[in-house]
Image (tube, helix red, strand yellow):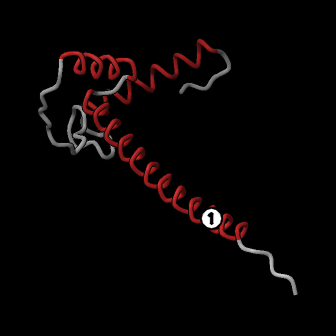
Protein backbone atom coordinates (compact mmCIF):
# COMPACT_ATOMS: atom_id res chain seq x y z
CA UNK A 1 0.00 0.00 0.00
CA UNK A 2 1.21 3.45 -0.78
CA UNK A 3 -0.33 6.53 0.82
CA UNK A 4 0.28 9.95 -0.66
CA UNK A 5 -1.35 13.10 -1.99
CA UNK A 6 -1.61 11.75 -5.55
CA UNK A 7 -2.10 8.33 -7.11
CA UNK A 8 1.24 8.63 -8.94
CA UNK A 9 3.10 9.40 -5.71
CA UNK A 10 1.29 6.55 -3.89
CA UNK A 11 2.34 4.05 -6.57
CA UNK A 12 5.94 5.34 -6.37
CA UNK A 13 5.96 4.76 -2.59
CA UNK A 14 4.34 1.34 -3.07
CA UNK A 15 7.01 0.24 -5.55
CA UNK A 16 9.79 1.51 -3.30
CA UNK A 17 8.38 -0.50 -0.39
CA UNK A 18 8.02 -3.54 -2.62
CA UNK A 19 11.64 -3.24 -3.74
CA UNK A 20 12.85 -2.86 -0.14
CA UNK A 21 10.77 -5.87 0.89
CA UNK A 22 12.17 -8.00 -1.94
CA UNK A 23 15.76 -7.07 -1.10
CA UNK A 24 15.16 -7.91 2.58
CA UNK A 25 13.63 -11.22 1.46
CA UNK A 26 16.67 -12.06 -0.67
CA UNK A 27 18.99 -11.17 2.19
CA UNK A 28 17.00 -13.32 4.64
CA UNK A 29 16.06 -10.41 6.87
CA UNK A 30 12.30 -11.02 7.01
CA UNK A 31 10.73 -12.15 10.26
CA UNK A 32 9.53 -15.80 10.10
CA UNK A 33 11.23 -16.44 6.74
CA UNK A 34 14.21 -18.64 7.49
CA UNK A 35 15.01 -19.30 3.86
CA UNK A 36 14.06 -18.01 0.45
CA UNK A 37 11.37 -19.66 -1.61
CA UNK A 38 7.83 -20.72 -1.09
CA UNK A 39 7.25 -21.80 2.51
CA UNK A 40 6.34 -25.44 3.03
CA UNK A 41 2.66 -26.07 3.59
CA UNK A 42 3.27 -29.07 5.82
CA UNK A 43 1.35 -31.39 3.52
CA UNK A 44 2.12 -34.88 2.28
CA UNK A 45 2.09 -36.02 -1.33
CA UNK A 46 -0.90 -37.91 -2.67
CA UNK A 47 -0.82 -39.82 -5.93
CA UNK A 48 -4.14 -40.99 -7.32
CA UNK A 49 -5.57 -42.57 -10.44
CA UNK A 50 -8.56 -40.67 -11.82
CA UNK A 51 -10.38 -40.54 -15.12
CA UNK A 52 -8.93 -38.00 -17.57
CA UNK A 53 -12.16 -35.96 -17.47
CA UNK A 54 -11.96 -35.70 -13.66
CA UNK A 55 -8.29 -34.67 -13.85
CA UNK A 56 -9.18 -31.99 -16.39
CA UNK A 57 -12.02 -30.71 -14.19
CA UNK A 58 -9.77 -30.57 -11.12
CA UNK A 59 -7.08 -28.72 -13.10
CA UNK A 60 -9.66 -26.34 -14.56
CA UNK A 61 -11.19 -25.61 -11.16
CA UNK A 62 -7.76 -25.05 -9.63
CA UNK A 63 -6.82 -22.61 -12.37
CA UNK A 64 -10.15 -20.80 -12.11
CA UNK A 65 -9.83 -20.41 -8.33
CA UNK A 66 -6.08 -19.69 -8.36
CA UNK A 67 -5.28 -22.62 -6.07
CA UNK A 68 -3.43 -25.91 -6.40
CA UNK A 69 -5.06 -29.14 -7.53
CA UNK A 70 -4.38 -30.58 -4.08
CA UNK A 71 -6.34 -27.72 -2.53
CA UNK A 72 -9.27 -28.54 -4.84
CA UNK A 73 -9.19 -32.14 -3.58
CA UNK A 74 -8.96 -30.90 0.03
CA UNK A 75 -11.95 -28.62 -0.59
CA UNK A 76 -13.96 -31.53 -2.01
CA UNK A 77 -13.09 -33.66 1.04
CA UNK A 78 -14.34 -30.95 3.41
CA UNK A 79 -17.46 -30.51 1.29
CA UNK A 80 -18.19 -34.23 1.69
CA UNK A 81 -17.73 -34.00 5.47
CA UNK A 82 -20.18 -31.08 5.61
CA UNK A 83 -22.66 -33.01 3.43
CA UNK A 84 -22.41 -36.05 5.71
CA UNK A 85 -23.01 -33.88 8.80
CA UNK A 86 -26.04 -32.23 7.19
CA UNK A 87 -27.50 -35.61 6.21
CA UNK A 88 -27.01 -36.86 9.78
CA UNK A 89 -28.73 -33.77 11.22
CA UNK A 90 -31.55 -34.15 8.70
CA UNK A 91 -32.08 -37.80 9.73
CA UNK A 92 -32.17 -36.79 13.42
CA UNK A 93 -34.72 -34.05 12.70
CA UNK A 94 -36.87 -36.42 10.66
CA UNK A 95 -36.90 -38.84 13.63
CA UNK A 96 -38.02 -36.03 15.96
CA UNK A 97 -40.78 -34.94 13.56
CA UNK A 98 -42.03 -38.52 13.19
CA UNK A 99 -42.10 -38.86 16.97
CA UNK A 100 -43.99 -35.57 17.35
CA UNK A 101 -46.38 -36.55 14.57
CA UNK A 102 -47.13 -39.91 16.19
CA UNK A 103 -47.81 -38.18 19.53
CA UNK A 104 -50.21 -35.73 17.81
CA UNK A 105 -51.93 -38.54 15.93
CA UNK A 106 -52.30 -40.56 19.13
CA UNK A 107 -53.86 -37.58 20.95
CA UNK A 108 -56.32 -36.96 18.07
CA UNK A 109 -57.47 -40.60 18.02
CA UNK A 110 -58.01 -40.81 21.79
CA UNK A 111 -61.67 -41.01 22.74
CA UNK A 112 -63.12 -37.92 24.34
CA UNK A 113 -63.87 -38.39 28.03
CA UNK A 114 -66.60 -36.42 29.72
CA UNK A 115 -66.70 -35.81 33.42
**What residue lies at 18% left-to-right and 20% top-to-bottom?**
51
Corner quadrant of residue 11: top right
Q: In screen coordinates, is 26 left or right of 82? A: left
**Residue 60 picture location, percent across and down:** 32, 16
Residue furthest to the right? 115
* 17 relative to 34, above or below: above
* 32 relative to 60, above or below: below
Circle 1 crowding by C-alpha within 10 Å: few under 14, some 14–19, many from 20: few
Q: Quadrant of the C terminus?
A: bottom right
Q: In screen coordinates, is 4 left or right of 70? A: right
**What residue lies at 64% left-to-right and 68% top-to-bottom?**
103
**Residue 92 picture location, percent across and down:** 49, 59
Residue that mark 1 sits on: 100
**What residue lies at 36% left-to-right and 47% top-to-bottom?**
81
**What residue lies at 62% left-to-right and 64% top-to-bottom?**
100
Q: In screen coordinates, is 91 left or right of 38? A: right
Amino acid sequence: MGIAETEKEAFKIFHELLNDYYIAYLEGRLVSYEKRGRPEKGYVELHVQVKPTIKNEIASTAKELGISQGEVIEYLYHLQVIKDNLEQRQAELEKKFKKLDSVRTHKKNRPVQYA
